[in-house]
Image: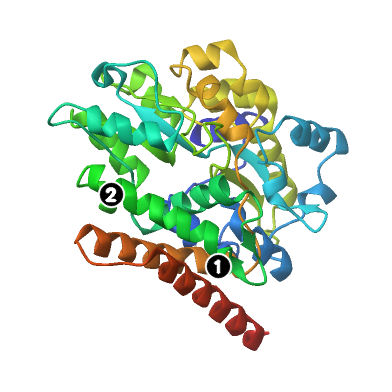
Amino acid sequence: MLALTERFKRAHPTVEIEWQRRSLKDFGDYPVELLAKEYDIILVDHPHVGSCAEKGTLVPLDTLIPESFLLDQEANSVGLSYESYLWKGHLYALPVDAAAQVASCRPDLLGTDALPATWKQVIELAEALPKGRKIGWPLCPTDAVCSFLSLCADIGGFHFFDEAAGIRPEAGAAAIAQMFELLPYLHESSLSSNPIQMYDHMVASRDIVYVPLAFGYSNYARPEYGDERLRFADIPTNSGVPKGSLLGGVGMAVSSYSKRIPLAVEFAMLTAAPEIQRTVYFQAGGQPAHVSAWRDEDVNRMSGGFFANTWQTLQQSYLRPRNRIFPKFQEQAGILIHKALCARQAGEHVSAAETVSELNGLYRALMKEDEIDL
């Protein structure tokens, strides 16, 4: 964003853009409608789109951006990145960053080039690792629910979540059971880590050699990052087809409260433009959302093949619900799943089926609460 700000100011020398950072957790959980009252441009997580659209928080960009630009974005966004910011016929953010949960490893420590394609192979790898080497899996509350949703999409298909009733019990219970099965093999930092914390540990130490499921960050695969770099790959699944990974990414939205909407929209278009995505945006540390960048030979050469190696996972990723209840449900569900994982790791009896029943009870309670508020 800082690099693009400097570029934007060449055409608009009197414009000042000041960026403020927020935490990874706030990116996923903090209400966008509160940010919209303070900022012109907001980088958003797509589960907030439904709530923002219904509250009139964000500008419907399709009303201001030329159709030719939007058609290119729709045809060339990675996976469902473009669709993730659509709500009831309007586009509320441009996809500028594409991400999903992917696999990663320390290739210098793993001892094999063949990474697991199935969860059965993940366990076989964990059992075969020498003493002092383990697999990791970032499962702090936020990432625990994300991994749970990826497993549900793998096990139960993309329609495992009924927005009227919640999670299909059989798919949810099987996903929780699979997480329980992996717990004994995981590095002790797993339940307290988010992806960035785990990747930082991986490059600084030698005890975590493989992670099956976590949001990918191409920075860790770039030569300029440091001497120890990670290699990223498609996720393991039960079928061996890398399908169902939870879609993440970042959209650039414009506040409907802004007094500078045309300028903000122009900046968003600059950021999402294909020639910018595969050059300035990537070179300054961004993780592009435009297909032209993901298929670019130079981009892949400079990122250790990050984009080519995770392409299938992104293209077959799962788009979670985006209704106004889901962001709040996702945050609280992560706490429930994390509590169950910690109890199981401590040796307590925890029922996967009862955990899913508790999750669905939470979802129904939030739906009822929302109806009362309306």
Q: Which of marks 2 and 1 is nearer the N terminus?
A: 1
Task: Give x and y (percent) for residue 252.
Answer: 62, 46
Q: Is residue 45 left or right of residue 77?
A: left
Task: Give x and y (percent) for residue 20.
Answer: 45, 50
Q: Is residue 9 left or right of residue 124?
A: right
Q: Of 101 and 92, which appears nearest the observer? A: 101
Assess disc 2: are there few (<14), some (14-19) or many (≥20) residues with their C-alpha within 10 Å of its C-alpha: some
Q: What element carries label 1?
A: helix
Label of residue 66 in the image: none
Amino acid type for the residue under numbered disc 2: Leu
Outermost residue toward the bottom? 372
Quadrant location of residue 222? top left
Quadrant location of residue 137? top left
- The image shows residue 120, relative to residue 352, as above or below, that is above
Task: Give x and y (percent) for residue 209.
Answer: 26, 29
Assess disc 1: are there few (<14), some (14-19) or many (≥20) residues with their C-alpha within 10 Å of its C-alpha: few
Quadrant location of residue 205? top left
Please say whether residue 42 is visible from this viewpoint.
no
Residue name at image x 69 percent, y 33 percent: 77
Residue name at image x 39 percent, y 55 percent: 177
Q: Is residue 72 left or right of residue 280?
A: right
Task: Give x and y (percent) for residue 352.
Answer: 40, 63
Amino acid type for the residue under numbered disc 1: Leu
- The image shows residue 96, relative to residue 357, as above or below, that is above
Q: Is mark 2 on a helix, strand or loop?
A: helix
Residue name at image x 19 percent, y 61 percent: 346
Please say whether residue 89 is visible from this viewpoint.
yes
Outermost residue toward the left? 131
Q: Please identify the quadrant where the C terminus is shown.
A: bottom right
- For disc 2, the marked residue is 183
- For disc 1, the marked residue is 34
Mark 2 vs mark 1, CA separation in Å: 38 Å
